[in-house]
Amino acid sequence: MDHREAEDTDQPAQGVVPGRPASVDESNQVTAGGYGVGVDAKYVPSSMAGPTRRVLRNVSEVRHFFRVNDTPVFFVGATPFNLLGLDRWVRNLSYISFYDGWDGAHPRIFTPKNKPAREFESGEDINNWLLRHHEVRALIDSRTPQGTRPKIALVFFNEETEEICEELGYDLILP
């Protein structure tokens, strides 16, 4: 029975809360400890946020999902420009880049200090180099809670990248 049929009976459909839009489905795990989709990420205690397994049905729910995200997400690339500004919408998103156009002034961009004077053949080569770099691995480890698999977002990747992420316990995701 869906929410339209529930209007004809005294009982609401399973997962539909009276007085709340039907797009807010409470039948699965409640996100952010019961906080609604309109709550800004900074007002949800980190102890209440966490991973959920529910279908996101509209832009509001997608936005809420990312605003209360507790899993570290790292965008890895030659520069952070592909997703620059997304850190304002996705909680716990950081940028790891080879080149830093802000010279360290952007609070969410990390660039390794020790970089080789070499030319890379592709974006995949840069990303693979970054993922293997000891400073990058230390940063990811320091920002990832014990028992959590960090998410690594890449625009350019190949089989080698997949192998590196698997070996290090990272989840490779598409931006």
Image (cartoon, helix red, strand yellow):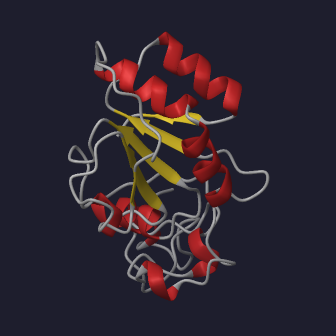
| Residue furthest out toward the right | 147
Q: Is residue 166 left or right of residue 155?
A: right
On-image quarter of the C terminus: top left
- Can residue 51 be seen here? The reply is no
Q: Horizontal and vertical percent for residue 97? A: 36, 43
* Count of labels in the image: 0
Which residue is located at x 21 percent, y 53 percent? 101
| Residue furthest out toward the front | 117
Corner quadrant of residue 26: bottom right
Which residue is located at x 61 percent, y 72 percent? 49
Q: Horizontal and vertical percent for residue 63? A: 35, 64
- Can residue 116 be seen here? The reply is yes
Q: Nearer the viewer, residue 114 or 86?
A: 114
- The correct choice, above or below, for 167 with respect to 5 in the image is above
Which residue is located at x 31 percent, y 58 percent? 58
Q: Nearer the viewer, residue 154 or 53?
A: 154
- The correct choice, above or below, for 22 with respect to 57 in the image is below
Q: Is residue 60 left or right of residue 142?
A: left
